[in-house]
């Protein structure tokens, strides 16, 4: 079972001192890769796409191992993560499982336990790979160039993309939260731009490639340009000539690379590392970020001139929570994708289960929904998915059996959750024009203040009630000067 597979082990020990490497190398013929920290691991993952199993240390106190799992599995979705846990680390185990980890192993290691765990992991990986292998590609009828969305917000997005692709020039900046489909939008722009679709679409994840490698990845290099450059290598800029270069997570690019990229955008030319010969290119750059680049410009971490070069055509992708009407067609599409190969295909979700999906905040957006449906299709034994088959966080969103009196204020609710879910009334319309953005801004303020009031200004609890990250809530409170105000 452990033949012809690649396993990446990430731990502080040297390979020669690693108990894991020793256990696996003497009992399997698997190809073992080793990294001493998450940064080295991401460099390995970016170069090796066939890694089946990732075994990583937790790397306390910052738990960088969990961050590695999220980024690494985003790069290689079929890779199964395993976390190394010290004995008795119950809290860490719960946190890892909540982060999506299926397997963990205790340290110090039992060699036989290591082998059995890796066998189980590989078996699960094959099941997952089989599911992916039988996954049909989205049809053109399934939305817009594979992007699913029937909501008004998505129809507006599709209209903007059509307008952009009428011209093959003009750089595009895709803004939006993680998981909203920025790369799909970039691919759609490339495919629908007739003069560029005949050439390469070249993606580059600026966050996944270490800073010292990003320059050589983009620009390429000449033989002998640096130690280890035994031959010349064509960079991704040259691969994208006459096509599209997609720069994902552009907000993570360091200042020195920003300056070099700016020159490429201004002059449409570059020099490979170690070369004095300038090469001309014709590319459209589509950049994507989940960061606020306007703030980054104000803070001095992102060049203003580069920002304006990239955002000739800015496009914002709406988060899933703002278009709940798209959840039904997305679930139907994902069921079609992941039902293939099942002896008993899942017929659908019950009404209560769908209500819970619509009520959820979806911090991971469409990617999170896709992962949920895929997991259910692999693990669920029935043909209909009920509320009890969903993770606990969805079941907690269901309203109580009895409704709370609408006259009751936050202090009269049974608990803070009901208070936070009690939405303030919308302003009455008088026939005069309504400033949508200002009204929405005030509505959010009132909702935040109500949650803070109901929890006696416990920001952690208020964030939980609002189904919002605590850091996001703190940022909104600070920017809007809401701290210790009274509910209007």
Image (spheres, rainbow, N blue to C red):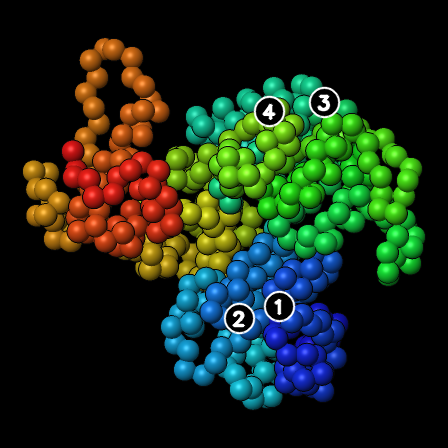
Q: Which label is found at residue 37?
A: 1
- State which tag comes first along the sequence, 1 or 3: 1
Q: Quadrant of residue 116?
A: bottom right
Dot in front, 2 or 3 = 2
Within 10 Å of the Cα at label 2, are there few (<14), some (14-19), or many (20+) other Cα atoms?
some
Q: CA distance from mark 4 to mark 2?
A: 41 Å
Element type where label 2 sits in the image: loop
Q: Are the residues tagged 1 and 4 within 8 Å (C-beta)?
A: no
Image quadrant where one finds the C terminus: top left
Left or right: residue 50 compared with residue 335: right
- State which tag comes first along the sequence, 4 or 3: 3
- The residue to which callout 3 is attached is 168
Front in this rendered view, residue 38 or 202? 38
120 is higher (above) or lower (below) than 331: below
Q: CA distance from mark 1 to mark 3?
A: 42 Å
- State which tag comes first along the sequence, 1 or 4: 1
Q: CA distance from mark 1 to mark 2?
A: 8 Å
| Residue shown at the point (33%, 56%) measured from the top left | 393
Dot in front, 4 or 3 = 4
Element type where label 4 sits in the image: strand
- The residue to which callout 2 is attached is 59
Q: CA distance from mark 2 to mark 3?
A: 46 Å
Dot in front, 1 or 4 = 1
Q: Position of residue 146 (x, y in %)?
A: 59, 37
- State which tag comes first along the sequence, 2 or 3: 2
Left or right: residue 203 compared with residue 333: right
Q: Quadrant of residue 440?
A: top left
Within 10 Å of the Cα at label 3, are there few (<14), some (14-19), or many (20+) other Cα atoms?
many
- State which tag comes first along the sequence, 4 or 2: 2
Q: Which label is found at residue 313?
A: 4
Q: Position of residue 484 (x, y in %)?
A: 20, 44
Q: Position of residue 482 (x, y in %)?
A: 26, 39
């Amino acid at each position: 079972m452990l033949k012809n597979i690649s396993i990446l082990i990430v731990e502080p020990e040297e390979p020669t001192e690693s108990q894991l490497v020793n256990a696996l190398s003497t009992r399997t013929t698997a190809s073992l890769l080793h990294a001493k920290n998450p940064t080295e691991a991401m460099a390995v993952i970016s170069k090796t796409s066939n890694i089946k199993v990732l075994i990583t240390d937790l790397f306390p106190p910052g738990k960088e191992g969990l961050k590695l799992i999220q980024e690494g599995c985003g790069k290689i979705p079929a890779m199964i993560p395993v976390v190394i846990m010290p004995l008795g680390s119950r809290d860490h185990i719960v946190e890892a499982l909540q982060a999506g980890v299926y397997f963990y192993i205790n340290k110090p290691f039992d060699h036989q336990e290591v082998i059995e765990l890796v066998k189980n992991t590989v078996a699960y990986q094959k099941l997952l790979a089989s599911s992916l292998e039988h996954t049909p590609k989205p049809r053109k009828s399934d939305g817009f160039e594979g992007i699913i969305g029937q909501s008004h917000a998505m129809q507006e997005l599709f209209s903007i993309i059509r307008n952009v692709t009428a011209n093959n020039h003009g750089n595009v900046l895709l803004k939006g939260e993680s998981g909203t489909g920025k790369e799909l939008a970039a691919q759609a722009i490339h495919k629908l731009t007739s003069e560029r679709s005949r050439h390469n679409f070249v993606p580059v994840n600026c966050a996944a490639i270490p800073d010292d490698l990003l320059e050589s990845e983009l620009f390429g290099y000449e033989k002998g340009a640096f130690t280890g450059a035994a031959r010349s290598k064509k960079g991704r800029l040259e691969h994208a000539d006459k096509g599209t270069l997609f720069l994902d997570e552009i907000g993570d690019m360091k200042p020195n690379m920003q300056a070099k990229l700016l020159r490429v955008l201004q002059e449409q030319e570059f020099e490979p590392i170690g070369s004095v010969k300038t090469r001309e290119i014709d590319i459209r750059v589509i950049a994507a970020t989940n960061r606020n680049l306007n703030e980054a410009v104000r803070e001095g971490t992102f060049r203003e001139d580069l920002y304006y070069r990239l955002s000739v055509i800015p496009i914002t992708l709406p988060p899933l929570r703002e278009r709940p009407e798209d959840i039904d067609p997305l679930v139907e599409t994902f069921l079609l994708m992941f039902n293939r190969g099942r002896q008993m295909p899942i017929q659908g979700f019950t009404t209560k289960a769908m209500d819970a999906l619509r009520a959820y905040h979806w911090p991971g957006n469409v990617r999170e929904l896709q992962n949920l449906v895929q997991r259910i299709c692999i693990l669920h034994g029935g043909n209909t998915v009920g509320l009890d088959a969903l993770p606990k966080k969805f079941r907690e969103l269901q309203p109580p059996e009895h409704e709370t009196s609408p006259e009751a204020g936050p202090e009269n609710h049974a608990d803070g959750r009901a208070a936070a879910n009690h939405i303030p009334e919308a302003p009455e319309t008088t026939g005069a024009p309504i400033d949508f953005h200002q009204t929405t801004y005030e509505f959010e303020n009132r909702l935040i203040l109500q949650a803070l009031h109901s929890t006696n200004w416990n920001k952690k609890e208020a964030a939980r009630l609002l189904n919002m990250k605590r850091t996001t809530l703190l940022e909104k409170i600070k920017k809007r000067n809401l701290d210790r105000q009274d509910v209007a």
